[in-house]
Amino acid sequence: MTCADITADLASRRADMITTPSGLMYEELAEGRGKAAEAGQKVYTHYVLCSTEGQEIDSSLAPGRGVPLDFELAAGGMIPGFDEGVQGMKVGGRRILVLPPGIAYGAQPPPGVAPGADLIFHVQLMSIGTPE
């Protein structure tokens, strides 16, 4: 799935997305299987980070990478919205996450991300606990 695909009708799909108290919005594309990922567990994800204009900013699937991103859920090692968006996913599950700046990079984003911009992720949970 490309960033152009992800953002093509995002404005109209936002109304049907789940919105959490933090402002995270997400759409469940595939539920996955097994137990849901919980705080304190190590997870392995593939992701594509897109701008609201449909440009790819970063991806774990980029040429020369291809290795899932691993991190411990709710341990403070990730931007809060991504961490929150992965919690509750099941292995094989896929989601679109829309992170407002307050749970993303805020006013000090990395290169390629506009200050105050929403971030859009396509994320897939590859495994929990050990790499697959």
Image: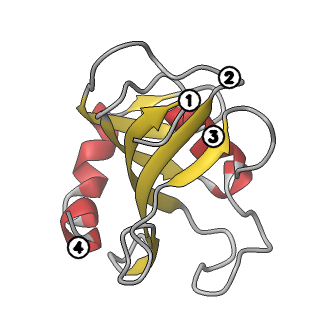
Q: Give the quarter of the figure containing the N terminus.
A: bottom left
Q: What's under tag 1, amino acid-wise?
A: Gly
Colour scheme of this structure image?
A: secondary structure
Amino acid type, mark 4: Ala
Q: Position of residue 79 (x, y in %)?
A: 70, 52
* Mark 4 element type: helix
Q: Is residue 88 above or below residue 43?
A: above
Mark whose residue sits in front, 3 or 1: 1
User: How far is the residue under mark 2 from the one under mark 4?
Assistant: 32 Å
Identify residue type, mark 3: Asp
How dense is the environment of label 4, judged by Cα within 10 Å: few (below 14), some, or many (20 and up)?
some
Q: Which mark is residue 4?
A: 4
| Nearer to me, 69 or 89 | 69
First reached walking from the N terminus: tag 1 or tag 4: 4
Q: Residues within 10 Å of mark 3 (few under 14, many from 20)?
A: some
* Mark 2 lies on residue: 39
Q: What is the C-alpha distance between the residues marked 1 and 4?
A: 32 Å
